[in-house]
Image (spheres, rainbow, N blue to C red):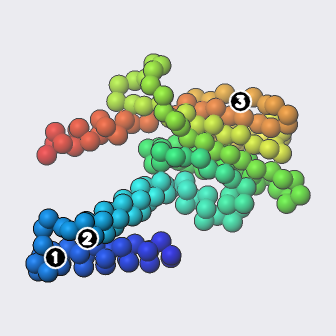
Amino acid sequence: MLASEELARLDLAAEELLVSVADRKVVLPLIPKNASIAAQLATELRLHLIEGRRETWLYHAVSESEMLGKSVTLIDKSALAGLLDPSQRDGLLSTAWLLVSENLKPSQGRSLTIQLGPVAPGGEVPDHKILVPITITSTGIARNRVDSGVWDALSRVGRYSDSTQDASLRVDIQCLVDNPADQEIRSEERS
């Protein structure tokens, strides 16, 4: 709510500045004071746009869920979750739910960290695909107590390997997604 109020304030300020230029109340080139105001508005608007891009489906699924919001830490600085196809999304979200919800009692201290990326070049990746590494680390979840549905859900996300250390489960997933750059080129070719 505060973010949308802030965005509305910035939008109004930008509109007022542009109307002033259009009505010739403010002449071009802008005097330093007006140029500074315009630059500040542009910077704030860009920051809001960037922040909006980071709020992927996974961000909303975690933050809007009472259970996941308390138990899951999401690290997705490049908004890579947005590249997953519907089956991969379902698999990743199902994995998170199954891992934190199984016989969960508040005193158990069960938590997950889901990290997407960074994307690293190299390796054998099919044409028009990129590899998004996903790491899930947990506390309070023993591997031998993991429901078999978790492994089925993980297989929808990509190839994975798991390991344990100090009673923590770690799952590394190699998630192949469509390369967004190739999709943009294809849509430009169709135009």
Q: What residue is disc 3 on?
A: 162
Answer with mark 2 or mark 1, whichever residue precedes in sequence. Answer: 1
Answer with mark 1 or mark 3, whichever residue precedes in sequence. Answer: 1
In the image shown, does 10 or 29 lie closer to the viewer? 29
**Image position, residue 79 (x, y; %):** 47, 48
Q: Nearer the viewer, mark 3 or mark 2?
A: 2
Q: Which secondary structure, mark 2?
A: helix
Q: What residue is disc 1 on?
A: 26
Q: Amino acid at mark 3?
A: Asp
In the image shown, does 120 or 81 lie closer to the viewer? 120
At x 64%, y 64%, the residue is 65
Q: What residue is disc 2 on?
A: 34
Calculate the distance from the C-alpha at mark 2 to the C-alpha at mark 1.
8 Å
Q: Is residue 4 above or below residue 121?
A: below
**Image position, residue 118 (x, y; %):** 52, 35
**Image position, residue 141 (x, y; %):** 81, 43
Label 1 crowd bin: few (<14), some (14–19), many (20+), radius 10 Å: some
